[in-house]
Amino acid sequence: EAQVTQNPRYLITVTGKKLTVTCSQNMNHEYMSWYRQDPGLGLRQIYYSMNVEVTDKGDVPEGYKVSRKEKRNFPLILESPSPNQTSLYFCASRDPSGYSYNEQFFGPGTRLTVL
Amino acid sequence: AQSVTQLDSHVSVSEGTPVLLRCNYSSSYSPSLFWYVQHPNKGLQLLLKYTSAATLVKGINGFEAEFKKSETSFHLTKPSAHMSDAAEYFCVVSVIGTYKYIFGTGTRLKVLA
């Protein structure tokens, strides 16, 4: 089954304790992206990756890091989490051929709480 | 610059009555437009997409949307609401020349029995 998986699904942590949220897709997509969803703000892009070793900032990159060492994986790293990073996070992937026409496939989400 | 505006943050309808969720976009070029649905505690699922072929786009679960260039709108409709349609709906525009997606702020649909 074609899918995007994220782990963990729920995470409660404390300020300053480094954490990683994993994302993996099995569709051989080159393009992957991370979003955060906050009430009333919709989804905002954090980082995206066009291919292995190619990443770029989205609209809200501060406080986050990413890496893309393999095509299927795109982890999101919070080096020193703060309470304002409490949010619902989504990973997505997309086939970039066809340019802007192709839809993104989303993971199930990771609900992060930073105390 | 491209942008998308969902005109209603909340919509309530009775079961069996029509649904209208409104979306306006701003784009210098012919855009690609999408509607996604998010059920409670679930990820986002594609309902339908417009890619400059037919202006009336049919999606899953009886939803459809009409692209109106003159009105810069891409409203989502369904003839008869079902309880299972209760969810949050996002209108999305894909930025031409990039791989960037811009999300609207969402419309929460409530279906009353």
Image: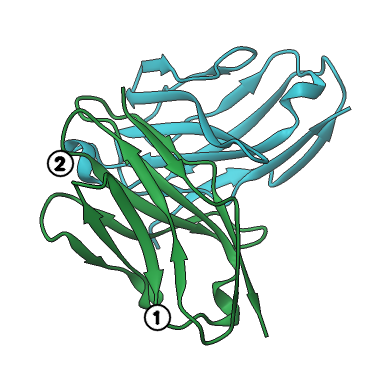
Chain colours: A cyan, B green
The residue located at (32%, 28%) in the rendering is: B2
Q: Mark 1: few, some, or many residues within 10 Å (few <14, many ≥20)?
A: few
* Nearer to me, A15 or B46: B46
Q: Mark 2: few, some, or many residues within 10 Å (few <14, many ≥20)?
A: few
The residue that disc 2 covers is: A98
Contact (CB < 8 A) between labels 2 and 1?
no
Q: Residue furthest left?
A: B53
The residue that disc 1 covers is: B79
Q: Secondary structure at mark 2?
A: loop
* Nearer to me, B71 or A82: B71
User: Residue B4 occupies which quadrant of the picture?
Assistant: top left
Percent x, y of residue B69: 19, 47
**Residue kind at label 2, given as amino acid type:** Gly
Percent x, y of residue A100: 22, 37
**Residue kind at label 1, given as amino acid type:** Pro
The residue located at (49%, 48%) in the rendering is: B7
Tell me how many marks there are.
Answer: 2
Task: Point out the image quarter for the N terminus of chain A.
Answer: bottom left
* Nearer to me, B54 or A21: B54
